[in-house]
Image (cartoon, rainbow, N blue to C red):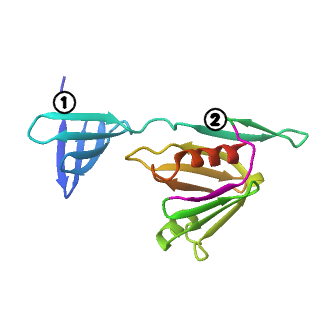
Amino acid sequence: MVSFRKSKKVGPFRLTASKSGLSVSAGAGPVRITRRTDGKIQRTIRVPGTGVSDTRVISGPTIAASSQRNNNSDGARASQSSVAPIRPKSLPTLNGYGIIVDFDGRTLTARATNAISARALLGAAHENRTLTVRRKDITSVRYRASTALVNGLIEVRTAAGTSFQLHFLHRQGEQRWADLAGMLSG
């Protein structure tokens, strides 16, 4: 069996080409994050000088919700979701990663806290830094829980074909964000 691997270090990044594809890793000191050729993300923590390390895959399938809504002939909605939809109600204001989110049970409002967040949330049309979407216009919701190393997110798609992501950090009230995803998919 013939194997091939070529690695090149560029700053804190290491690019590795092999028969199975290209992988990229970044890190310094005892911590390294790698995007493997199979698309999975792994983190490695090592104790310098001991040979001891811990490597774990930190990505994988989305954890909580994937919801698709269908309209029945009588106008009622059917929902398919791996997380139980929650009856809509209002939530306290949520502070995410560069965004502030409000939901009153009918309307989702996301305000970017800076120009970079506005561009990520709204794309090129980001002058007013606010996104407003009615719940009835949302067609699908995908939720990914946060970890200590990966931000959580709620990805929302609308009937108009637009999609956006609401990012949050591990310490920013995980359960409230999960509740919001359930309310939006319900």
The residue at the far bottom in this view is 127
Amino acid bearing label 1: Ser
Using the image as rendered, state which of residue 181 and residue 165 is in the foreground. Answer: 181
| Residue under label 1 | 3
Q: Which residue is at 39% across, 45% downward?
A: 148
Residue 145 located within the stretch drawn in magenta:
no
Residue 35 seen: yes
Q: Which residue is at 21% across, 55% downward?
A: 12
**In the rendered view of the protein, which quadrant contains the C terminus?**
top right
31 is higher (above) or lower (below) than 134: above
Of label 2 and label 1, which has the lower sequence position?
1
186 is higher (above) or lower (below) than 159: above
Q: Where in the figure is residue 108, as x and y percent of width and height?
A: 69, 59
Q: Which residue is at 24% across, 42% downward?
A: 17
Mark 2–mark 1 distance (CA, rounded to whole Å): 44 Å
State which quadrant residue 39 falls in.
Answer: top left
Q: Residues within 10 Å of mark 2 (few under 14, many from 20)?
A: some
Residue 91 located within the stretch drawn in magenta:
yes
Residue 162 seen: no
Image-based side of 17 in relation to 94, left or right: left
Q: Which residues are magenta?
A: 85-96
Q: Secondary structure at mark 2?
A: loop
The residue at the far top in this view is 1
**Residue 151: mark:** none
Using the image as rendered, state which of residue 2 and residue 163 is in the foreground. Answer: 163
Q: Where in the figure is residue 99, as x and y percent of width and height?
A: 54, 63
The residue at the far right in this view is 74
Amino acid bearing label 2: Val
Q: Secondary structure at mark 1?
A: loop
**Residue 83: mark:** 2
Of tags 2 and 1, which is closer to the observer?
A: 2
Q: Where in the figure is residue 158, as x and y percent of width and height?
A: 69, 53
